[in-house]
Image (cartoon, rainbow, N blue to C red):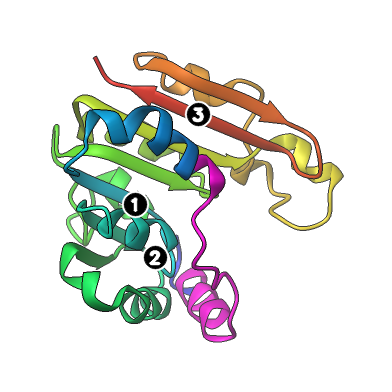
Amino acid sequence: MSKSEREAWNRRYGEGSHRSKKPDPFLLQAFEEYIGPEFPDGGAALDVAGGVGRHAIWMARRNWKVTLTDISEVGLAQARKNAGDVARRISFVAADLQEVSSGSPRAALRLGRSAYDLITVFFYLERTLFPHLLRALKPGGFLIYKTYTLEQRKFEGGPYNPRRLLKPNELLEAFSSLRVLHYRETIRERGIAEFLGRKA
């Protein structure tokens, strides 16, 4: 990601874009059905491109220790403010995830092997990051992934660049080593794919 893209996201957050504090319903569903029963006392989570912290904060309030990473320093500053008294349970990391996936020595985030019980990715797509996410999951850990598909080009809003849109069944193929607990692609109102998998 270029410096100009970081500046663009800083500007968006500064102008009030992407400021929702409400967690995505898919996160709530995954926790209720699968993750909560397995991790009743919380665990270690990575929230990828988490912006103002809507998912990281929700998890931190449930005793999870969360690493929240985003390219935008402005978004992370808002997340820290939004977190209030649970900010102590969240590490806020401004990182270019393309640098992370390329192994650049400049990368602000290192994805260690078997570091997280849970990784969440919502509305962000960087394919070179996929193997790093798999490696960073602990055995028994969960991956929640939800983002736009190519079908989104039929609707207004969201990205239109194919690089930022999933192909049919792409998440199933990319994370085929995980046990699939939920997968759905929808074309109602938006083109979206939802994936929940668990590492053996």
The answer to whether residue 32 is left or right of residue 119 is right
Q: How crowded is mark 2: few (under 14 residues within 10 Å), some or many (20 or more)?
A: many
Residue 140 in the image: above or below residue 51 = above
Type of the residue with mark 3: Phe
Return the disc, 3 or 2, that comes first in the chain's sequence: 2
The answer to whether residue 12 is left or right of residue 134 is right
Find residue 22 and report its horizontal and vertical position in percent: 52, 62
Label 3, on which residue?
Answer: 195
Q: Residue at x 25, y 68 (%)?
A: 92
The answer to whether residue 101 is left or right of residue 25 is left
* Label 1 element class: strand
Q: Residues within 10 Å of mark 1 (few under 14, many from 20)?
A: many
Return the disc, 1 or 3, that comes first in the chain's sequence: 1
Return the disc, 2 or 1, that comes first in the chain's sequence: 1
Q: Quadrant of the C terminus?
A: top left
Type of the residue with mark 2: Gly
